[in-house]
Image: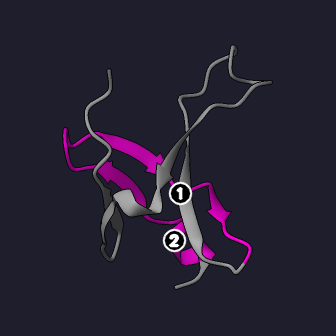
Amino acid sequence: MTYSQLKRKEVVNTCDGRRLGNVCDLHLSDDGRILALVVPGNFSLQTLFKPEGCVIPWSSVVMIGDDVILVDIGKPA
């Protein structure tokens, strides 16, 4: 699977069914393994110059389907 295929998929939290958005970046190890997915946070003027995103550890990925990535990151506090 390529990055361009991965970034087209929507990320959904299985705990509460919340749509988190699409993958915008990856954290990679030195040997090229995916360590985490990065999904952009909500856009606002406050986050314009300090972008926030949700970093999802690769171990939290439950399943990658045809058009969705299911993750288990628990309920937000």
Residue 23 belongs to the span the image colors magenta? yes
Task: Look at the picture and state if 3 lies above or below 77.
Answer: below
Rendering coords of residue 28 (x, y %): 66, 67
The answer to whether marks 1 and 2 mark residues whose Cβ atoms lie closer than 8 Å is: yes
Q: Quadrant of residue 48?
A: top right
Residue type, label 2:
Leu
Give the residue at x 70% y 80%. 31
The residue identified by callout 2 is: 6
Give the residue at x 61% y 74%. 4
Q: Which mark is residue 37?
A: 1
Q: Which mark is residue 57?
A: none
Task: Look at the picture and state if 76 lies above or below 55.
Answer: above
Q: Quadrant of the C terminus?
A: top left
Q: Which residues are magenta?
A: 3-30
Residue type, label 1:
Leu
Q: Quadrant of residue 29?
A: bottom right
Give the residue at x 32% y 27%. 76
Give the residue at x 45% y 46%. 21
